[in-house]
Amino acid sequence: MKVMKFGGTSVASAERIRHVADLITSTSEPKLVVLSAMAGTTNMLVEISRQLVARHRHEALMMLTKLKRKYEIETQALFPDPASYDRNWTIVNETFFFLEQICYVENFTLFDEKKILARGELLSTAMMLGHLADRGYKAVGLPALEYMRTDKNAEPDEDYIREHLRAIIDKAPKDTKLFITEGYICRNAFGDIDNLQRGGSDYTASLVGAALEVDEIQIWTDIDGMHNNDPRFVEATAPVRRLRFEEAAELAYFGAKILHPTCIKPAQAKSIPVRLLNTLAPEAPGTLISTDTDKDLIKAVAAKDELTMIRLRSSHQMTPWSFMSKVFGLFEHYRIPIDMVASAEVAVSLAVERGRLTPEFIAELEALGTLELEHNLTIVCVVGDMEWENVGFEAQILYALREVPVLMISYGGSDYNLSVLVDAEDKRKALLALNEHLFEPTIRQSKP
């Protein structure tokens, strides 16, 4: 069995839904298909929720009317037969009736917002199942809210997922080869509707793939695999054909938008290959993520924005070991992840996401010594086979950046990553320099 996840752009319209239906029915092998909400839907539902939190009911209803009209148009296009349209619009309209009713809740809460956000994926699966039925394909829906659950720490409850997902599949007719389920949505440990956070459809695909120990997990988007640089800033990029799990996880965490950072872990734990493919060019090979890779190569560059550098020098009253213990203890207490760190005996520099810094946290840091903050920074991460035996890779990277001011360097924390911290204004310059020095010679040599 394969798991095939399709993102929002892949199901963005009736035409795209038909195209996805073509892809998932093109072979007879068993498949479990994970669908995101139609592109733009979740953003609209988030904005509707914000309006309801602010008690702007009229504005929320206006947005909902606009969204409903969009779905009415796409439903008409997807189901041109009047009887089929009536049948499927009844199902779609029930969702909008629910959304209209929730707009009149007096004390709108976070729980109500989660109920709203779940509707996008429920709509996508309903429309796909209706379309497949019209085409004569037997497909079984797997309601994610019946098997996908998080625990009290908001982490996926993998034992529960495996047990309940397999139980639902076992109830399906024995000849079923096509299953459809919702990405992103779940229930929490208390049984309330929740979600796996933004981009969580990738996570759903990886979790169900691991639970069923499938042959391959496919993530279908609108780009041909993971590229070796950010195409928004660099024109001459190329897909990376093979990556190790660790390399892909580094790139996803540090800014490669094609993949959700957490989605690698369940697949990696079961050694299930993950393939990134292009819905609009299904014949393209994409990127294969597995335990194997091309050795002795620098693979790709990614960048993470909105970082702050914290420089802290100890007061003379603390021993070096006490100082470091207190610093990292504060990060643990406030649950703030550290993206980069460089240290000396009585001083430390750290890069963290600016949005995670609170006044209380800053005040406690100031009590430990002399504090400096520098905002609007970017981490540029170079990923590849960085084992220490590969002499010269770090020199190539730093040489490429010789005209870019670098505030911090991180190397040796893993075998797959060298990162530098630069001013956000130098991000484009750094990406272009790395591309020219590390990748363009290879591209030129490979051309006939």
Image (tube, helix red, strand yellow):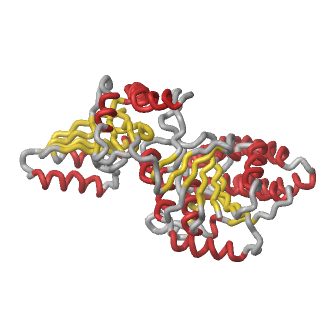
Q: Nearer the viewer, residue 103 or 22?
A: 22
> Looking at the rendering, which quadrant does residue 179 occupy?
bottom right
Name the residue located 53 percent from the left edge and 44 percent from the top edge: 241
How far across and how far down the image is residue 322, in percent?
13, 55
Whether residue 400 is visible here, answered yes or no, is: yes
Whether residue 113 is visible here, answered yes or no, is: no
Name the residue located 75 percent from the left edge and 57 percent from the top edge: 27
Q: In the shown orientation, is residue 47 left or right of residue 290?
A: right
Q: Nearer the viewer, residue 238 or 361?
A: 238
Q: In the shown orientation, is residue 188 left or right of residue 395?
A: right
Above or below, 44 against 151 in this view is: above
The furthest residue to the top: 403
Name the residue located 29 percent from the left edge and 57 percent from the top edge: 333
Q: In the shown orientation, is residue 281 left or right of residue 234?
A: right
User: How many labels sit on residues?
Assistant: 0
Q: Nearer the viewer, residue 270 or 211?
A: 270
How far across and how far down the image is residue 199, in percent?
55, 50
How far across and how far down the image is residue 192, in percent?
57, 66
Q: In the shown orientation, is residue 214 left or right of residue 180?
A: left
Above or below, 141 against 381 in this view is: below
How far across and how far down the image is residue 271, in percent?
49, 62
Q: Nearer the viewer, residue 286 or 56?
A: 286
The furthest residue to the left: 317
Q: Quadrant of the N terminus?
A: bottom right
The furthest residue to the front: 448
Q: Quadrant of the C terminus?
A: top right
Name the residue located 67 percent from the left edge and 65 percent from the top edge: 143
